[in-house]
Image (cartoon, rainbow, N blue to C red):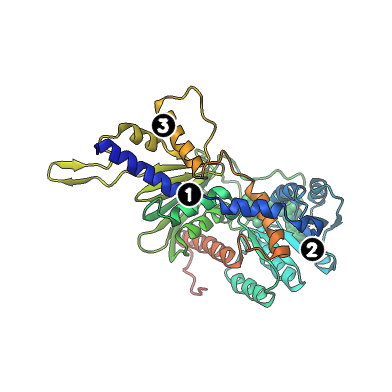
C-alpha cells in the first residue's frame, strides 16, 4: 500500500468518526415534538419581562402553537406594549408579576427580566404551581443556588428550564457528540469569546429609567459581561468536559468605556477543570474581531464553532524528532493535508461552483459526510425556537428538559466564581463562604 493511500484511509476514518456521531437524533426528536398533539392543548403561559430578549422569544413563541400567551407582564410600559404586539395574540397585560402567578389559567411562566430578579421569580413561580422557563444566568448570588434547588425539589412535577439555548442547537449537539465519540482525540481546551466594538449602553429617553434600561451596567443588578456573554460558553465548556470547573482565575476592568459604568468592559477568565483541561473565555467591548464563538480543541482535532456553522480541523500528529529524523502524520499527502487544514464544514456555507482543487476535495468530504447522515447545510431550526418547543413538550409529554436545574446552577456558579476571581485580582478580599 502506498504511503498516500494509508494517509487517505486515515483521513476518511476520521471523517467516519465525525459522521457516525451525527444521526441527528436531537433534530428528529425536536421535529417530532413540533408536530406533536401539543397544539390541540397548548400550554397557557404568562410572559414576564418583554424587553430585548423577551421580544426575541415572543417572536418565536408567536410561531409555536404548543403554547398560548394569556398574559404579558412588564413594568416598563413601552416594553409591555412591544411584547403584546410581538406575540400578536392579544394577551392580557400586567405590570405586577404576582398577578400573573395568581391566575389559575396560567400553567407556566417565562422569565426574561434582569438577572437580579431571576431567583425570586423562579421560586415564586414554582411555589405558585407554575412551570418555569428562565433566561440565563439562572441566578445572580451564590446563596440563591440552594434557594432555587430547594424550591425545585419541593415541586418535582413542575418543569424548570434555563434559557441556555445552545443546548437546543443541533450544531452544538453534534459538536458534543464529536467530543464524546473521540473525533477530536483528547480534549483539553475550550477557547471562547464574545467581543464587540460598542458601548453596550442603551439609549434612555427619560433619566428616571436609566437603571431599569441599563441594568447591565450596574453591579446591583448584573454580573456584567461574564453573566451576559460568558454564561453561554461557561455552559458549553461544562458540557464538553462533563464537569464543573475546580478553580478559576480572572482579570478584568473598566478599561475603555469610562462613562460611569460599574461592570467591566474587558474581562477574561481561565476555568480549570483539572488534568490540564481548561476553558479560556474572553469578552471585550473595544474590538469585535471574530465576535462570538468557541473552539473545542483536542490532540486529534479542533472544532471551531460559531453560531451558524462549525468547522472541523484535523490535527496533525505530534511532530516527534529523534536525532535528525522527523516524522509527520501528513507526509506524502499534500492534497488531503491542504483540505483538512482548511477545515471540513459541519454546517457549511454554500459551495462555490468555481472552486479550486482543494475546495473540490472538501466537497467530496462533505458529500461523503452527507451519505452518512451528518451533512446539513444549516441548523434545521433556530435554537431559540427549539428550546421553547422543548419546554412545552417537557410540560405536556414529559420530555427531558433541554437545560435543567443543575445545568443552570453549574453555569450560574461559574459566572459568580469568575466575577469573584476578577474582583480578587482587583484587590477584593477572598470570600470565605463557599457553596
Ligand atoms: N439567551 C440569550 O441569548 C439572551 C440574550 C439576551 C439576553 N438574555 C437574558 O435575558 C434577560 C433579559 O435581558 P434583556 O437584554 O432582554 O434585558 P432588557 O432590559 O431588554 O429586558 C428586561 C425587561 O424586564 C422588564 N422588567 C424589569 N423588572 C421587571 C419586573 N419586576 N417585572 C416585570 N418586568 C420587569 C424590563 O422593563 C424590561 O422590559 C437577561 O437575563 C439576559 O441575560 C439572554
Task: Quote the CA–CA distance across marks 2 and 3.
Answer: 57 Å
Q: Is mark 2 within 8 Å of ligand 1?
A: yes
Q: Quadrant of residue 263?
A: bottom right
Q: Which mark is residue 128?
A: none
Q: Are marks 2 and 1 in contact (CB under 8 Å)?
A: no
Mark nearer the N terminus (2 vs 1): 2
Mark nearer the N terminus (2 vs 3): 2
Marks 2, 3: nearer the viewer: 3
The location of residue 246, given as percent across then percent down, is 43, 66
SS at circle 3: helix
> Which residue is labeled 2 in the image?
97
Marks 2, 1: nearer the viewer: 1
Task: Quote the CA–CA distance across marks 2 and 1.
Answer: 35 Å
Residue visible at 69% across and 75% down in the picture:
155
The location of residue 181, given as percent across then percent down, is 43, 55
Mark nearer the N terminus (3 vs 1): 1
Q: Quadrant of the image for the N terminus? A: top left
Q: Which mark is residue 361?
A: 3
> Which residue is labeled 1 in the image?
192
Amino acid at each position: 500500500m502506498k504511503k498516500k493511500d494509508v494517509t487517505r484511509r486515515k483521513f476518511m476514518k476520521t471523517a467516519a468518526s465525525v459522521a457516525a456521531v451525527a444521526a441527528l437524533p436531537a433534530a428528529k426528536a425536536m421535529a417530532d415534538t413540533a408536530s406533536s398533539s401539543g397544539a390541540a392543548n397548548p400550554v397557557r403561559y404568562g410572559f414576564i419581562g418583554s424587553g430585548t430578549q423577551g421580544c426575541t422569544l415572543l417572536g418565536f413563541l408567536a410561531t409555536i402553537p404548543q403554547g398560548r400567551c394569556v398574559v404579558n407582564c412588564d413594568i416598563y410600559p413601552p416594553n409591555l406594549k412591544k411584547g403584546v404586539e410581538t406575540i400578536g395574540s392579544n394577551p392580557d397585560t400586567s405590570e405586577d408579576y404576582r398577578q400573573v402567578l395568581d391566575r389559575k389559567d396560567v400553567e407556566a411562566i417565562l422569565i426574561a427580566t434582569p438577572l437580579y430578579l431571576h431567583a425570586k421569580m423562579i421560586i415564586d413561580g414554582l411555589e405558585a404551581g407554575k412551570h418555569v422557563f428562565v433566561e440565563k444566568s439562572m441566578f445572580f448570588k451564590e446563596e440563591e443556588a440552594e434557594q432555587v434547588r430547594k424550591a425545585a425539589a419541593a415541586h418535582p412535577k413542575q418543569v424548570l428550564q434555563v434559557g441556555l439555548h445552545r443546548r437546543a442547537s443541533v450544531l452544538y449537539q453534534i459538536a458534543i457528540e464529536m467530543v464524546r465519540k473521540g473525533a477530536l482525540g483528547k480534549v483539553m481546551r475550550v477557547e471562547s469569546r464574545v467581543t464587540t466594538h460598542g458601548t453596550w449602553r442603551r439609549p434612555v429617553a427619560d433619566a428616571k429609567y436609566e437603571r431599569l434600561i441599563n441594568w447591565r451596567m450596574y453591579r446591583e443588578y448584573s454580573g456584567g459581561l461574564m453573566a451576559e456573554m460568558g454564561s453561554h460558553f461557561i455552559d458549553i465548556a461544562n458540557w464538553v468536559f462533563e464537569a464543573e470547573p475546580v478553580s478559576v482565575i480572572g482579570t478584568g476592568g473598566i478599561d475603555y468605556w469610562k462613562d460611569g459604568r460599574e461592570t467591566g468592559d474587558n474581562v477574561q477568565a481561565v476555568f480549570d477543570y483539572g488534568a490540564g483541561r481548561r476553558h479560556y473565555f474572553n469578552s471585550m467591548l473595544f474590538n469585535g474581531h471574530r465576535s462570538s464563538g468557541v473552539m473545542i480543541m483536542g490532540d486529534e482535532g479542533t472544532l471551531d464553532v460559531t453560531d451558524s456553522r462549525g468547522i472541523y480541523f484535523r490535527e496533525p500528529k505530534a511532530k516527534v524528532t529523534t536525532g535528525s529524523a522527523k516524522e509527520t502524520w501528513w507526509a506524502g499527502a499534500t492534497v488531503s493535508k491542504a483540505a483538512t487544514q482548511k477545515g471540513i464544514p459541519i454546517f457549511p456555507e454554500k459551495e462555490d461552483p468555481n472552486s479550486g482543487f482543494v475546495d473540490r476535495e472538501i466537497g467530496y468530504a462533505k458529500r461523503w459526510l452527507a451519505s452518512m447522515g451528518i451533512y446539513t447545510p444549516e441548523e434545521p431550526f433556530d435554537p431559540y425556537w427549539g428550546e421553547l418547543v422543548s419546554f412545552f413538550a417537557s410540560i405536556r409529554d414529559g420530555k427531558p428538559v433541554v437545560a435543567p436545574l443543575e445545568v443552570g446552577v453549574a453555569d450560574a456558579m461559574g459566572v459568580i466564581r469568575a466575577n469573584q476571581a476578577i474582583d480578587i485580582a482587583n484587590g477584593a478580599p477572598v470570600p470565605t463562604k463557599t457553596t
